[in-house]
Image (spheres, rainbow, N blue to C red):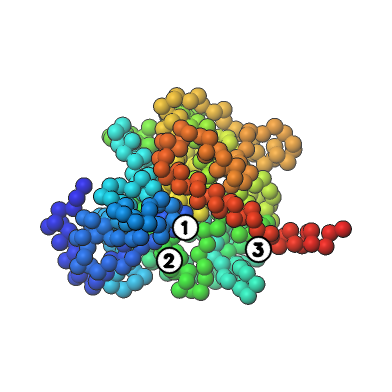
Amino acid sequence: MSQPAADLADRMAALRAQGIHSVLATFTDLNGGVKGKLVPLELLPQAVAEGAGFSGPSITGTGLPRRGPRSEYMGRVLPQTLQPWPLLPGVAHAVCDGHAGGEPLATCPRQVLKAQVDRLRERGWTLWVGIEPEFFLLRRTATGWAVADADDTLDKPSYDLRAIGRNFGLLDRLRQTLQDLGFELQQIDHEDASGQYEVNYRFDDALAAADRYQLFKLAAGEVAREHGMVFSTMPKPLAHAPGSGLHFHLSLTDHQGHALMADPAGVLGLSELGHRFAAGLLHHADALAALCAPTVNSYRRLAASRSASGTTWSPVWKAIGDNNRTCLVRTVAGRLEWRLPDPACNVYAAIAGTLAAGLDGIDRALPPVTPTADDLYERHAAGADLPARLPRDLQAALDALEVDAGLREAVGADFCAQFLQVKQDEWAAYAREVSAWEWQRYADAP
């Protein structure tokens, strides 16, 4: 829908009154990176109507050619996303949708999620997503990387107030920045690994939730740099500590706002539709791993290993359980917590895949999965039978996405083709590397 010229003029006048002279027009590439450029405020009408231009082949995953009318990636600014950017004086931030040749770009991750949201809208439904970002604060050292806070060394560091006190300047700056950007913050805490934190904020509809997570990453990265630290979305930087997840809390409502997944009298507090959605997630979990856990390092987190703190929350097994954090799907208060995603994912693609899988479960009336009441890590330690587990590495996840034609078609064949190509190249590059562990173990072996 185009922005009425009068409304846009009023918006520009309001921004000028706040001292805004430029717009930071941002988009998301296939790897989930936030990219963009500064556009003078007076050129905003053109950026809204036609888009800010970028060289298409210079952006990971567009699949655009080096010449011709479709070689330009046009990021069309969405006026409703305009707001002052508190970290750059005189600058407003805006989200863009990708276009090429005058048409929505099928390989743009935001367009991929919009297509899934449109499928919901046809049914009169809305997907609500609460995202729980976990992250590490790191520093570069002369020999590599280290946790930014050298005193953050507790065996069980969850909820450590001393670490919060030592890093309060950064955390409070992040709090203020996020509130200035309209986040409704709920809590900030230290997580179960040294240097690891979590920020919780209010849920939103699927597209707005994805936009907000990208805004969170951009803000957190800048605030960390201000304080001489690195905001890291690496899923598992520490070998013997828990990794970072990006859990999605999922619920559906109809056009009247009625909850569709919840049923207080149902098994696990879910309705039949809720169970079918969950069954779709578990049915497509192997392929979804590629979209939700898309890096080599992601599978360090998705491993049935004991952490130094004695606790791990890694969702290794394809199971569902009532408030059971050892399951891939946790049910709580009539909603689903999808525990597969990690913060390295492209959040648009991860939510799009999640939604496509859930809708497939609904449309095919997949039967409910028998709930798991046990601690699956205790069963694992005892050598007992377990549910099927997720892929053990990125290559296995990519293979699963390759053969799940239904999910690829639902998410978007063009996007998935680009995704598989980029990630296969990533796996091949990793497979060629000789690690320090290999040198240490084999260089002088008898």
Q: Amino acid at mark 1?
A: Val
Q: Which mark is residue 154?
A: 3
Circle 3 packing at 10 Å, graded few (<14), some (14-19), many (20+), is some
* 119 and 130: which is toward the camera: 119
Mark 1 falls on what kind of element? strand
Relative to 205, 296 lies left or right: right
* 376 and 24: which is toward the camera: 24
Q: CA distance from mark 2 to mark 3?
A: 24 Å
Residue occupying the far right of the picture:
446
Find residue 144 and report its image quarter.
bottom right
The residue under the point 47% across, 57% down is: 199
According to the picture, the residue beneath numbered tag 2 turns out to be: 174
Q: CA distance from mark 1 to mark 2?
A: 10 Å
Q: Give coordinates of residue 361: x percent, y percent.
A: 45, 29
Sequence-first disc among 3 and 1: 3
Relative to 145, 21 lies left or right: left
Circle 1 packing at 10 Å, graded few (<14), some (14-19), many (20+), is many
Q: Are marks 1 and 2 in contact (CB under 8 Å)?
A: yes
Q: Amino acid at mark 2?
A: Leu
Residue occupying the far left of the picture:
6
According to the picture, the residue beneath numbered tag 1 turns out to be: 199
Q: Give coordinates of residue 145: x percent, y percent.
A: 61, 68
